[in-house]
Amino acid sequence: MIMKANIVIVGGGVSGCAIAYNLAKKGVKDIIVLDKSYLTSGATGRCGAGVRQQWGTEMNCRIAKASIEFFEGANEELQYDGDIEFKQEGYLLVASTEKENKQFEKNVELQNKVGIDSRKITLEEAKEIVPYLNTEKLIGAAFCPTDGHLNPFLLTDAYFKAAKRLGVKFYMNQEVTDIEVIDGKVNKVITNDFEIETDVVVNAAGGYSKDVGEMVGVDIPVFSENHEILVTEPIEKTQGPMVMSFSLNIYCQQTPHGSFIMGRGDKEKTPGYNIESTWKFLDRMADTVVGLLPPIGNLRVVRQWGGLYNITPDKQPIYGKCEVEGFYLAVGFSGHGFMFAPMTGLLIAEQILGEENTIDISKLSIDRFKKGELYLEPSVV
Amino acid sequence: MKNTIICRCADITLEDINNLLSSGVTEIEEIKRFTRLGMGPCQGRTCMQLIQRIVANHNGVSIDQIKMHTSRPPVTGVKLNQISRGARNDNES
């Protein structure tokens, strides 16, 4: 079967759905979203569900701040029949090294400059926010009260339904097997069941973005890596903010539902598409969380899983055009694609339509790697 | 249907599931993500076979054509303290 579309979006995660919604809202017709499995089956549905603005590069700060502002009114804007479960009780970042503490100072200065209400706080103040925080090995902390938590499945569902109402077509369980390029221009998307003629393709394939880039001959400087998470049984409300430390390698938050979600990175992991759960993660995660938040040790782990970070050399996303005409990138989120999704949707839609961008993202184009103009994000777990 | 509980951990009724199925949801993995069905302490060990039958009936296919959700570790709930102590013992030996 051969179909036609104005725009084909590869990836039914939150980024793909947000891009589709924004394009449709701006009046674009005949948009198709494809996913090789079900909606949110990739990184979106596997993420830690935290949303924060406490970043160390100006671009990440600006994109995060605007995204948080969107979340505040997302139920209404998207006319969602449910609730996206947005909770703003902050991110409490704790430092266990002088270097990290100094980084927090620098970050807070930058964040305040772009209007984010973060602040450097003492360990006593940190204990007021999370009384059972074990500050023994800690040096300092930073806090931003408007950071928080949001349900990834439901936010994606909200975008999906809003986009569908505006006429966007979604085909799930359709794996893109090839993309045809003629004379340097995107021409056709081929899936396991059909072919779609189109001039514009958006790569929002998350962990698989490099493979989709290769289909058009674009070498995207990203790799994928398994990051694991676990969740506990739910209990009554105990902890407001996300507690996070880059040096201790942990993030841990109680969801509105009552369960605690926590994760950490593993520098020894080999890049690839394996998302299996490991004992090593469970051991180290348990040890880290019991040390930092002792009472959490009494909770039972009910489930662990893994998902792919799609990582760039500077830990910032790659947005926009590339050398193949009509091929747009929304990739390389390095573990924070979920929390940036509202701006990803808006900014990519603006780029495709040739509008002026709400936030200048020229620094985030793929060209930066050739020019060597990298701005390394220091604050990533 | 309102009073028929399918997932006891998350209090999901037959009506909740039927509503999702009639809204176009087709897979157990999706039902799980939207409702938390199978994500509670039992991890789907009581409800998964029920939900498999409900989805099969709704889609008009036989039960073996319905993909089950992914079983994830641990097999049963384990306290973080116990895992942490176990990990420390391993490192010492």
Image: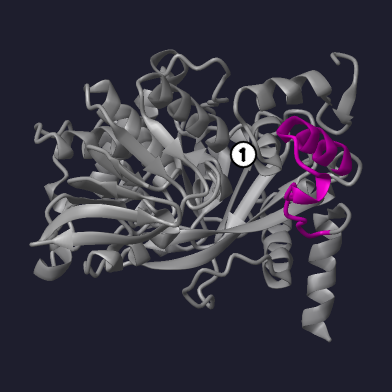
Q: Percent position (x, y) of residue A82?
A: 58, 18
Which residue occupies the extreme bottom position in the image?
B93
- Relative depth, front residue between A60 and A187: A187
Identify the magenta region.
Answer: B49-74
Q: Percent position (x, y) of residue A353?
A: 13, 34
Residue type at mark 1: give it: Lys
Where residue A27 sits, quadrant-wise, is top left
Depicted A53 relative to depicted A318: above or below: above
**Measuring 75% from the left and 49% from the top, which residue is drawn there?**
B65
**Measuring 54% from the left and 25% from the top, which residue is drawn there?**
A84
**Is residue B69 magenta-colored?**
yes
Q: Is residue A133 visible?
A: no
- Relative depth, front residue between A94 and A136: A94
Q: Disc 1 is attached to a residue of which chain? A: A
Depicted A236 relative to depicted A180: above or below: above
**Is residue A334 magenta-colored?**
no
Depicted A24 relative to depicted A32: above or below: above
**Measuring 65% from the left and 45% from the top, which residue is drawn there?**
A261
Q: Percent position (x, y) of residue A335?
A: 44, 54
- Relative depth, front residue between B72 and B62: B62
Which residue occupies the extreme front position in the image?
A1
Q: Is residue A93 visible?
A: yes
Q: Label 1 neighbourhood size at 10 Å, few (<14), some (14-19), many (20+)?
A: few
**Measuring 26% from the left and 32% from the top, which residue is drawn there?**
A346
Residue A192 placement, left or right of A234: left
Residue A307 placement, left or right of A235: left
Residue A372 placement, left or right of A378: left
Residue A248 placement, left or right of B82: left
Q: Which residue in the protein does label 1 denote?
A: A127
Q: State the SS at label 1.
A: helix
